[in-house]
């Protein structure tokens, strides 16, 4: 089925193609129809499910990724997806209205372009904006009049204007009249199917009012509610608030776990009890730290921008320090536990159960497990890990492969790091000590919470 998106088509009726130099091209070159309704730039954890949801909503979709290897993984159905999305991908791959390419010149064939490329931080926690800048440059270069461009990557406030609106204007494409530019943060939650993407409202802010309306119309066809904010900047800041809120609350939960340990109270008894209050409390659980592409990165985009404005945000700074310190606390705790039996960590055997940054994903980006394993090894422990979803990782610059049978490892200590749904943990009962950093394991004689 091909959706004839009347709004998107109507925007294009008056389309005036613009040359890269910014000069209007002669009318005979006006493109009469777009081959695709939406092109999604960046087919990763966000872009791929988004493109599948858009196709499901009837849009003709072009998935664009700079990495041929990534496209191959998708074509071979090996991408890390929820079961429902895997079914969608099988259908899409056989669908003429769903196409994959690494050729960015095809962006000119799409009525709308959604940008979903990574926005990581470097080892000094400074935003690495080169990927986003590069993707936006490409999108601007291939933009045609009438197009709607929506940035969805999490980024600093002002990015949409700096990287899209300004350069488009420099090319002679005025946002709000020639092209439409908006920001709409992505709220996808990989590995968790409590809420499908289509159930979660989208926030949208346009560079102009008309830009906002176009973006609302496009996204409103596949989500139940679009919440419009007056500016792209308000939408950018909304995402930073959402993830900073999570970071601060995770840090508070971590701090409470330390407080409760000191006072001899099981922290989960307290958190579960507080969570019975139907208002004014939201349940956050302590853990070994945070990983993935959101919580360890996003608040740093805000803090970095604030530093440029000579403004501090002590609550957020403190929360991020607390979170960053957590993997070291796990190593400290492991050393303390093993010091009763051995002399510190040297010569011991420590096994991590689960290394993905959260349950049910094949993603180890920023996973606390990597720092924990590196720290244990640096202190002389022999380390190993078991994880049904992660075949190999790098620790202290060397490859480490998953152990297939944890019982053969002979662990002095097991650190429970990631409790995947399909993770058989029966063997934990046979090991001397389990340090549970997930706070999810049932009480057992050999189990200690972090
Ligand atoms: N992963 C999440 O849970 C999540 C949730 C909400 C928001 N976000 C945000 O969404 C954005 C994307 O994150 P992700 O996890 O999907 O990243 P990802 O690393 O999984 O995927 C990004 C993809 O973009 C491709 N890419 C990079 N540069 C490109 C270019 N110039 N042109 C085309 N493709 C390019 C990469 O090859 C990769 O396949 C980030 O800003 C992130 O903060 C992520």
Image (cartoon, rainbow, N blue to C red):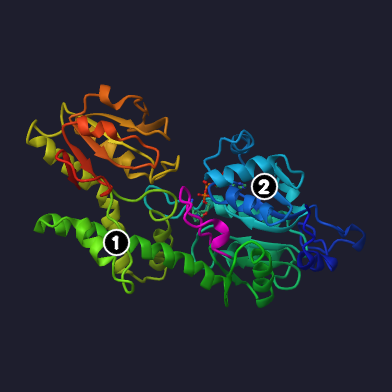
Q: Quadrant of residue 150?
A: bottom right
Picture residue at 48% right of the left edge, 69% below the top = 238
| Mark closer to the observer (2, 1) | 2
Q: Is residue 165 above or below residue 97?
A: below
- Density class for disc 2 (Cα within 10 Å; few <14, some 14-19, many ≥20) is many
Q: In whole angstroms, how far apart are the C-alphas of marks 2 and 1?
A: 37 Å
Horizontal and vertical percent position of residue 18: 80, 61
Q: Is residue 8 above or below residue 62?
A: below
Horizontal and vertical percent position of residue 207: 63, 72
**Residue under numbered circle 2:** 63
Horizontal side of residue 59 vs 322, given as left or right = right
Q: Quadrant of residue 255?
A: bottom left
Between residue 145 and residue 244, name the one nearer to us.
Answer: 244
Give the mark nearest the N terminus, 2 or 1. 2
Between residue 182 and residue 121, name the one nearer to us.
Answer: 182
Q: Which residues, given as a range, are shown in magenta? A: 184-199
Picture residue at 74% right of the left edge, 43% below the top = 95
**Residue under numbered circle 1:** 319
């Amino acid at each position: 089925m091909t959706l004839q998106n009347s709004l998107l088509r109507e925007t294009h009726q008056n389309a005036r193609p613009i040359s890269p130099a910014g000069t209007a091209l002669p009318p005979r070159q006006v493109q009469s129809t777009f081959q695709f309704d939406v092109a999604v730039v960046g087919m990763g954890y966000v872009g791929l499910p988004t493109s599948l949801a858009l196709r499901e909503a009837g849009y003709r979709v072009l998935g664009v990724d700079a990495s041929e290897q990534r496209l191959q993984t998708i074509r071979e159905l090996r991408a890390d997806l929820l079961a429902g999305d895997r079914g969608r991908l099988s259908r899409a791959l056989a669908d003429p209205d769903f196409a994959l390419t690494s050729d960015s010149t095809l962006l000119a064939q799409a009525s709308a372009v959604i940008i979903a490329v990574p926005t990581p931080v470097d080892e000094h926690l400074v935003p690495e904006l080169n990927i986003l800048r590069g993707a936006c440059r490409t999108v601007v270069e291939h933009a045609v009049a009438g197009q709607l461009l929506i940035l969805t990557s999490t980024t600093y406030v002002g990015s949409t204007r700096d990287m899209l609106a300004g350069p488009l204007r420099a090319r002679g494409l005025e946002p709000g009249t020639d092209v439409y530019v908006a920001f709409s943060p992505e709220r996808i939650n990989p590995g968790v199917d409590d809420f499908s993407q289509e159930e979660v409202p989208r926030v949208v802010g346009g560079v102009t009012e008309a830009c906002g309306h176009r973006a609302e119309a496009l996204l409103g066809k596949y989500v139940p509610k679009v919440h419009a904010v007056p500016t792209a900047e308000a939408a950018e800041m909304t995402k930073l608030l959402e993830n900073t809120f999570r970071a601060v609350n995770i840090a508070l939960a971590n701090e409470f776990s330390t407080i409760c340990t000191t006072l001899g109270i099981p922290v989960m008894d307290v958190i579960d009890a507080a969570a019975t209050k139907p208002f004014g409390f939201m349940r956050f659980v302590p853990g070994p730290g945070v990983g993935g592409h959101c919580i360890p990165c996003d608040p740093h985009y805000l803090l970095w921008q604030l530093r440029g404005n000579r403004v501090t945000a002590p609550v957020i700074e403190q929360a991020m320090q607390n979170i960053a310190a957590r993997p070291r606390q796990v190593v400290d705790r492991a050393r303390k536990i093993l010091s009763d039996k051995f002399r510190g960590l040297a010569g011991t055997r420590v096994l991590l159960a689960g290394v993905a940054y959260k349950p049910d994903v094949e993603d180890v980006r920023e996973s606390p497990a990597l720092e924990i394993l590196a720290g244990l090894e640096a202190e002389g422990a022999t380390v190993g890990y078991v994880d049904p979803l992660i075949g190999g990782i790098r620790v202290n610059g060397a490859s480490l492969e998953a152990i297939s049978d944890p019982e053969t490892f002979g662990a002095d200590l097991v650190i429970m790091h990631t409790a995947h749904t399909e993770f058989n943990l029966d063997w934990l009962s046979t090991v001397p000590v389990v340090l549970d950093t997930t706070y999810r394991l049932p009480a057992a004689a050999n189990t200690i919470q972090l």
